[in-house]
Amino acid sequence: FTNNFIVAQNNTDTLTIDSGITIQGAGNIGNGELTLVNNGIITATLPAGLVLEPNGNTSLIGFVNNNLMQASSNSTLYLQGGVFTNTNGTIQANDTGTVRLNNSVTVNSGNFTTAGSGKIILSVGQTGTISNGTLTSGSQFLDENNSTLFVSGIFTNNGTFTLGAGVNLTDLRIVGNTEFAGNGTFSLSNTTQNRILAANGVDTLTVDAGVTIQGAGQF
């Protein structure tokens, strides 16, 4: 990544981005030190990528997205650890762009959207958590080999969610009673290393009438 940083003097400071403001380019916003409220637009526009890395202190709000965070063509937006509250916001990968979830990131609510060949990706070997998220119509989410995504609440899939195991176990794990809603598809690659399972032995997964689960793996 580049050496551009937007950081805090100390790890309790908050930056609020107003609705008329756009931040774009490559670098790191937060560096694990900053609480951020985004009412504007944050866009990764360059091949080096843009890292969003909020304060990891769970007693603070982390990163609140009330508008748009996105990766433009041929660029990558990294959500790098911490908690992102996306209730009123959209996380978007435009055509040939990528949004990557890394370092045990948690995203609460809101929309995940892609266009063209853009993808939202949980990176190889990483873990992440989504609570009450929505994959919008026609959008693509990829759970890469050897990764584990924890989902809870109502996960609405109106696009294509791919479990992409190769030689390693690749998991979609429900936490608590969870519902797969929407009219999309969960597509499992051609290996039994794909798993959809519970974090414990008492949770219930409800798959709604419009949802399709297909491919190979363990359920």
Image (tube, grey):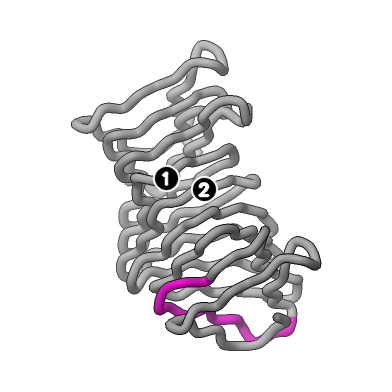
- Residue 134's spot in the image, x, y percent? 42, 61
- Residue 114's spot in the image, x, y percent? 35, 63
On the image, which quarter does residue 11 sit in? Answer: top right
Relative placement, left or right, of 205 versus 13 is: right
- Residue 159's spot in the image, x, y percent? 40, 73
| Residue type at the position of mark 1 | Asn
Depth order, front residue of 41/167:
41
Residue count near mark 1 (Cα–Cα under 10 Å), binned few <14, some 14–19, many ≥20: many
Label 1 secondary element: loop
| Label 2–label 1 contact, CB within 8 A | yes
Residue 208, above or below 6 = below
Q: Which contiguous range is marked in magenta?
A: 180-192
Residue 185 colored in magenta in the image: yes
Q: Of all residues shown, which one is farthest toward the left? A: 20
- Residue 50's spot in the image, x, y percent? 43, 41
Depth order, front residue of 202/81:
202
